[in-house]
Amino acid sequence: MSEGDVPTEGREPLHAPTPGTLVVDTGRGDRLGEFRGVAGPYWSLRPVGGGPEWEAEPGAVRRATRAERLHVELERWNARSRGERL
């Protein structure tokens, strides 16, 4: 098993996305975050605008949809236009 593979109960291992990939933690109310890495049996996620990382069950994480990714990019562009740093 490679470092990015996380064992699941009786299923194929889940392959961890590339760090920085936008994902949604469905176990925490569809919380959007950036994938940071594998921490034991969990995946480390970080809020898009910064903040403390949290650990998520790999089976409860899905890749962000195109619309969700676009929403994040628009928020970043708007913040930059106001002179804010993200």
Image: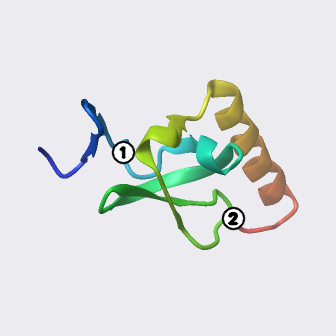
Q: Quadrant of residue 40?
A: bottom left
Separation of residues labelled 2 and 1 (CA atoms): 20 Å
* Precedes in sequence: disc 2 or disc 1: 1
**Image disc number at residue 86:** 2
Dot 2 falls on a residue whose secondary structure is loop
Marks 2 and 1 close (CB-CB < 8 Å)? no
**Image disc number at residue 63:** none
Q: Is 33 left or right of 35, judged from the image as shown?
A: right
Q: Height in image: 37 above or below 8?
A: below
Dot 1 falls on a residue whose secondary structure is loop
Q: Residue furthest right?
A: 82
**Figure quadrant of the C terminus:** bottom right
Q: Nearer the viewer, residue 29 or 2?
A: 29
Q: Is 83 left or right of 19, judged from the image as shown?
A: right
Q: Is 62 left or right of 32, judged from the image as shown?
A: left
Total numbered circles: 2
Q: Height in image: 56 above or below 59?
A: below
**Image disc number at residue 18:** 1
Residue 12 in picture, x, y percent from top left: 24, 29
Amino acid at dot 1 = Thr
Q: Height in image: 47 above or below 65?
A: below
Q: Residue at x 81, y 58 (%)?
A: 79
Mark 1, Cα crowd under 10 Å, few <14 / some 14-19 / many 20+, is: few
Q: Residue at x 42, y 45 (%)?
A: 58
Q: Height in image: 77 above or below 49?
A: above
Q: Residue furthest bottom?
A: 52
